[in-house]
Image (spheres, rainbow, N blue to C red):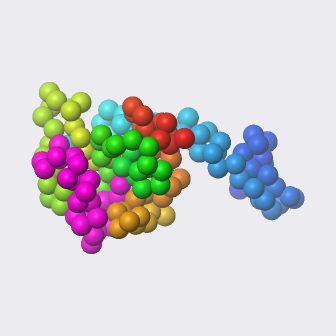
Amino acid sequence: MSKIVSALADDDLLTRDGSTVTDVNWADLLRERAAQAPALLAPGSYIPMVARRGLDRTLADLSTALADTDAVWVTGSAGAQTIAPLAPTTQLTLRVSDVSAARRRLKLLPAPPDQVSRADVVLITTNYDVAVEGAARRNNVPVVAPSQLVLDCLTGAGRMPAEGE
C-alpha cells in the first residue's frame, strides 16, 4: 500500500504528512483513473433498450419503479442530474445486476439491432458489485456513488464527459 501512496504523492494526487494522508486531489485522481478505464459504452459492455412509455415518463417514474430494489442503480446523465442539473437527460444509463428484472420494472424493450443508436436506455452489467459500492438513494432514486458517477460520465459518450467534470 505504501508504494501506491508514494506513487500518488509523487504525481501530486495526494498530500501526506509522514505516513498520514492529509489531502486527496479527488478531481485529478478521478480524471487519471478515467483515462485508464475502458469506455463506458464500449462494444459488448451494454444492452441497448427503448423506454416503452417514453424516456421522460420512465425518468419521472424511477423512484416508484425502483423503490424496493437494490438491483438497479442510475448513473450517467440521469445520475448527474441528481447532483448538478445541466441539461435534459437524453439517455438513461443504468447499472443492473438482473437485466430481466430491470426490463420488467421499467417497461423496457430491446432496441432493434438495426437501430441501436436510437436506444434511450442502456443497461450495464459489467463490474456491477464494484460499481454500486457506496451507492445511495437521492430523492428516492437509486444512484451510484459520486466517484463512480464521475468515472462513468468521464468515460461516457456525448456530453457525459462534460457532466462528469
* Residue 122 horizontal/vertical position (percent): 27, 44
Q: Left or right: where does residue 110 sit relative to residue 147? A: left
Q: Is residue 12 magenta?
A: no
* Residue 51 horizontal/vertical position (percent): 17, 47
Q: Left or right: where does residue 138 sit relative to residue 9? A: left
Seen at 65% across and 42% down, the residue is 28
* Residue 21 horizontal/vertical position (percent): 77, 59
Give 14 or 164, whichever is nearer the viewer: 164
Residue 132 in view here: no
Residue 118 in view here: yes
Quadrant of the rendered image containing residue 96: bottom left
Q: Which residues are magenta?
A: 50-74
Quadrant of the rendered image containing residue 165: top right
* Residue 89 horizontal/vertical position (percent): 33, 43
Q: Is residue 55 magenta?
A: yes
Up-down relation of residue 85 to residue 42 (above or below): below
Q: Residue furthest top?
A: 114
Q: Quadrant of the N terminus?
A: bottom right
Up-down relation of residue 142 to residue 162 (above or below): below
Seen at 70% across and 48% down, the residue is 25
